[in-house]
Image: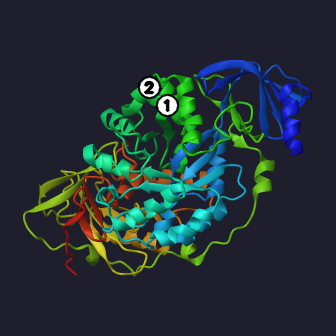
Amino acid sequence: MDRMLAERVLAASGAKKASLVLKNARVVNVFTAELEKGDIAIEDGYIVGVGEYEGQTEIELGGSVVCPGLIDGHIHLESSMVAPGEFERSVVPHGTQAVITDPHEIANVAGAEGIRFMMERTKGLTLDVYFMLPSCVPATGLDESGAVLAAENLSPLYEEERVLGLAELMNSYGTVRADRGILDKVEEARNRNLLIDGHAPGLSGKELNAYVTAGVQSDHECSDWEEAVEKLKRGQWIMIREGTAARNLNALMPLFKEPYYHRCMLVTDDKHPGDLIRLGHLDYIIKKAISLGADPVHAVMMASFHPAQFFGLRDVGAVAPGYKANFIVVSDLNEFEVKQVYKNGKLVAENGAMKEEILAAEQRSVETPVRVGDSFHLDEIHPEDFHIKKKGNTIRVLCLTPGELTTKSLLAPWVEKEGVAPGVSLEQDIVKMAVLERHHNTGHMGLGFLGGYGLKRGAVATSIAHDSHNLIVAGTNDEDMALAANIVRKNRGGLAVVAEGKLLGELPLPIAGLMSEEPAKWVDERLEELKAQTRSLGIGDSIDPFMTLAFASLPVIPELRLNTYGLIDVEKQEIVETIISCM
C-alpha cells in the first residue's frame, strides 16, 4: 500500500492532523465559479481538504483569497530575452507556477539541439515548464532559418515526458491545402493522442473547417470578437493573448462571459523582461480584465483551471482535495495583488520575490552547445550593400498596423532627398528595411521599405526577427544601417541603436542571438535605455521598437512581410517583389 496516500486520506478524513493547515481562507472554487470559505488542509504536498481542519502547523489567512497557481498556456520563453532561470525569478512571484512553451525561436536557430538545450535549462526549476514541439521550422517554405525540422526530427523529442503536443501550426495556408510535410507532423501528434495548437489569424469559413479537421484544437491569434466566436463554434479553444507586442484583451472581453469563458484561457505569447518586472505576468492580465468588467473568478479560472484542463494537467489548476498544493494567496480578489506563492505545499515566493533558499537549491550548470552559443555566421556588412537600384516611380511599402501584428501593403512615390537614403520619405513615415541571412553565411538579403515605424534618423538592428531570426535592420540611411548591423554581428546577436555614425546603445544576446545570461533586471535596464534612444530618434511611445520590428519579417501573418527572399504576400505565399541591391 502507498503509505503516503494513506496518510493523505487520514488527514483528509480528520483522523489525524494535517501537516499544514491554512486557516480562514476564501477559496476560489473553479468547479462552481464561486468563493468558498474554509480551512485548507495540506499533506505530503497535496491538498486533502477544504472545510474545518486542525494542523500540526497552522497559518492564519484572515479571509485572504486563495487561488490555483496560474498557468500560461502559450509562451515563447525566448521572448523574455533571459535564460529560463531568470524568467522563473520574474514570473513565480507573480503567481505563475507553470508555462507551456513553444521553443520555436531557438529551434529556428539551432534545431533540435536548441530544443534540448531549453529542456535541460528548465529541469529542476520551481516553475513547471512543459513543451509543445515546434511545428513550423521554418515558418513556411518562404523563409530561411538556421534549421529545418521535419516530422522525423521531432519524433525522438516526443519521448520527453514534459512534451504535451505539437505547437502552433503557423502554416495554416499549407495545412488547409493538405501539405504532406505538415500533415506528417500532425498525424504523429494525433497518433500519440497529443494536442495540436493553432495559429491562424483571420482564417474563416471552409478553410477554418479544414484547419480544424486536421486536428488543430486552439487559437491565440484572434483579434476581434467575430473571429473568436466563429472559431469557438468550430470547437477550438481560444487563447486570449495580452503580450508585449500583440494585445487582444480589450477586443475579446465578451469572452469572459457565459457561455464562452468555459473554453477560453489567458496567455502572453511574447513578453519582454520589463513588462514582466513592472507589470507582471498572468496576474497583470487578470487585473486588467477585472478593471474592464470581467468576473474575477472567471478570470482566475481562465488562467488556471482552463489551461490545466486543456493540456491534460490533471492534478493542478484547482484548490481542492487530490490536487497538488500549488496555489497563490491574494489579499483581495478585485485588486489581485499576489502576496504568497505555494508550490507543493511550500512557500516559494512572498511579497514579490522568490525565497533565496529555493533559488539556491535549484542552482546547476548546463553547458551551452556551440550551435546555441555561437550562432552568428555573417560577413562584415557595408553601406553599399543596402543601396537600392531604382525600378520605377513607386515603391511597395510594408505598413505596420498600430497595436497589431498585421500589416498592410501601400504604394508610395519614389523620392530622393539629401540626408536620407533614396526611397526614404520621413514626411510619409517611410524608412528603409533589410533582412540579412545570418545562419549559414549565404549572403542572401531582402531589401524594402517600412511604413508607420516612426524613425526620423539613425537605424535600429536586431537579431530577434520572427521566426527565423535573421538580422533585421531599419534605418533612414545606409551608413547607420551598416553600423547597427555590424554591432549586432560582433555581439553574436542582440540589439543596437545608432545615429549619425555613433553607437547610442546595444544589448548583446549571445544565447542563439535571442537571450542573455545576465539578470532580468540588468537586461531590462539596457532594453529601456535602448527604447529611450529610439524615442529620441522619432519612434513613438505607442510602439515597441524592437518587438514590432521583430515581427516585420514573419511570413505567416497577413498581409505583407519582408525576409531574406524579398517581399512576401502572406495570403498567397508568394514573393511579390525582390529589390535588387546596386552591388
- Could you say whether the residue bearing mark 1 is in a helix, strand or loop? helix
Q: Residue furthest left?
A: 393
Q: What residue does disc 1 label?
A: 262
Q: Depth check: give the residue in front, 341 or 496.
A: 341
Left or right, 289 with respect to 113, comes to left
Q: What residue type is labelled 1?
A: His
Left or right, 394 with respect to 534, comes to left
Task: Note whether residue 458 is visible.
Answer: no
Measured Cα–Cα span from mark 1 to mark 2: 7 Å
Task: Note whether residue 330 is visible.
Answer: yes
Question: Which mark, residue 161?
Answer: none
Label count reads 2
Q: How crowded is mark 2: few (under 14 residues within 10 Å), some or many (20 or more)?
A: few
Q: Where is residue 539 in the image (x, y as percent from the top left)?
A: 34, 49
- Could you say whether the residue bearing mark 2 is in a helix, strand or loop? loop
Identify whether 443 is placed above or below 72. Answer: below
Identify whether 469 is placed above or below 333. Answer: below
User: Within the image, what quadrant is residue 581 found in?
Assistant: bottom left
Identified at 37% across, 50% down, the residue is 213
Q: Do the residues labelled 1 and 2 touch (CB within 8 Å)?
A: yes
Q: What residue type is labelled 2?
A: Pro
Identified at 28% across, 46% down, the residue is 401
Identified at 20% across, 70% down, the residue is 578
Q: What residue does disc 2 label?
A: 259
User: Within the image, what quadrant is residue 137 found in?
Assistant: bottom left
Q: Is the N terminus in the top left, top right, bottom left or bottom right quadrant?
A: top right
Q: Where is residue 83 in the image (x, y as percent from the top left)?
A: 61, 59
Identified at 70% across, 54% down, the residue is 125
Q: Where is residue 257 in the image (x, y as percent from the top left)?
A: 45, 24
Q: Where is residue 36 in the image (x, y as percent from the top left)?
A: 68, 19
User: Within the image, what quadrant is residue 307 found in?
Assistant: top right
